[in-house]
């Protein structure tokens, strides 16, 4: 179906089509699912106009295969930023390195409700929107009506001017503003402080929000909060992704969970 959003399930042989596999569980929950073997060409999964909500890679006892498959998937433009979940038995969990490139993992056997919840959580983390009351930029949620901010669901306390500066940048993504313009628009034309005030508040925002805030400094010009189209894609590192030591041991489309409780701002 043109324009449909799928969950892509990748596995070995016909195992990914088994009754207790992710594809079966997700279809029962109403998801549109496409399946692919580890050794298949990922371009075949991207035929038509389909887009993808998530990738689930079923590693079995070979997490190294899953890492290789994910790297191959990232070469496809439609999959390069799709959130990826590694499905793995408990006995293999310790072999998976944080640098593997996966956004999340789930321990087999599946619990369908948990798999569904993890996919939706990843969709929420990647989503961005703006309306009259709230703006979401990646993991940052800014509630303009309540003057509240959260990062990945955790409270972030901002001063009144930090909040005002963040709200201004968020409402004008992709536009470059000089320090003088920011002073006039955020602090007001009667403010008598210097341009260093802007730099100090930008530094504080970066300290509190970290890499989640895509705020760019343009030397000699000013600042810009990057628009979604300007966001760089993530690339996996080339270091070891799976340790060598032995270890024993489609969901309904749409729907975004409500934002987690957010923090109050305070005046300076």
Image (spheres, rainbow, N blue to C red):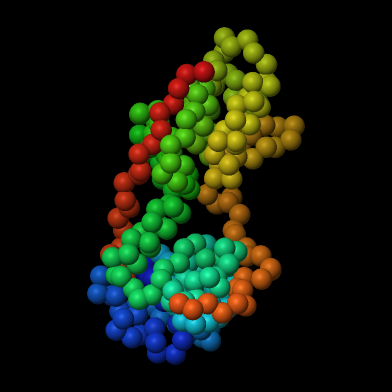
Q: Position of residue 154 (x, y in %)?
A: 43, 41
Q: Is residue 51 shown above or below 246?
A: above
Answer with the quarter of the image where residue 143 lies.
Answer: top left
Q: Residue at x 54, y 39 (%)?
A: 209
Query: Can the viewer see residue 184 in this picture?
Result: yes
Q: Residue at x 59, y 11 (%)?
A: 191
Query: Can the viewer see residue 55 in this picture?
Result: no
Q: Is residue 38 shown above or below 185?
A: below
Relative horizontal placement of residue 130, taking residue 231 as reference (left or right): left
Taking the view exactly as shown, the residue that stands out farthest to the right is 220
Q: Position of residue 229 (x, y in %)?
A: 55, 51
Q: Residue at x 68, y 21 (%)?
A: 196
Q: Quadrant of the N terminus?
A: bottom left
Q: Nearer the viewer, residue 188 or 165?
A: 165
Relative horizontal placement of residue 153, taking residue 70 as reference (left or right): left
Relative horizontal placement of residue 202, taking residue 51 as reference (left or right): right
Q: Position of residue 208 (x, y in %)?
A: 55, 36
Taking the view exactly as shown, the residue that stands out farthest to the front is 248
Q: Nearer the viewer, residue 200 or 127?
A: 200
């Amino acid at each position: 179906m043109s324009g449909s959003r799928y969950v892509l399930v990748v596995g070995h042989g016909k195992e990914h089509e088994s009754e207790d596999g992710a594809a079966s569980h997700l279809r029962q929950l109403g998801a549109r699912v496409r399946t692919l073997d580890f050794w298949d060409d990922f371009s075949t999964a991207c035929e038509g106009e389909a887009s993808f909500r998530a990738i689930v890679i079923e590693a079995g006892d070979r997490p190294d295969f899953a890492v290789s498959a994910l790297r191959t998937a990232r070469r496809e433009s439609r999959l390069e930023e799709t959130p990826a979940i590694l499905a793995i038995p408990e006995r293999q969990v310790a072999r998976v390195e944080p640098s593997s490139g996966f956004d999340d993992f789930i321990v087999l056997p599946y619990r369908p409700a948990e798999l569904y919840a993890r996919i939706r959580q990843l969709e929420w983390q990647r989503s961005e929107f703006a309306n009259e009351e709230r703006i979401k930029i990646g993991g940052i949620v800014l509630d303009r009506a309540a003057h509240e901010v959260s990062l990945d669901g955790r409270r972030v306390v901002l001063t009144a001017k930090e909040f005002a500066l963040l709200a201004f940048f968020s409402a004008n993504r992709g536009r470059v503003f000089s320090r003088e313009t920011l002073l006039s628009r955020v602090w007001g034309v009667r403010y008598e402080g210097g341009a260093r005030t802007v730099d100090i508040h930008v530094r504080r925002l970066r300290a509190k929000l970290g890499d989640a805030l895509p705020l760019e400094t343009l030397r000699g010009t000013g600042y810009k909060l990057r628009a979604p189209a300007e966001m760089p894609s993530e690339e996996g590192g080339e270091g070891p992704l799976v340790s060598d030591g032995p270890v024993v041991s489609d969901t309904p489309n749409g729907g975004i969970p409500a934002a987690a409780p957010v923090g109050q701002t305070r005046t300076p």
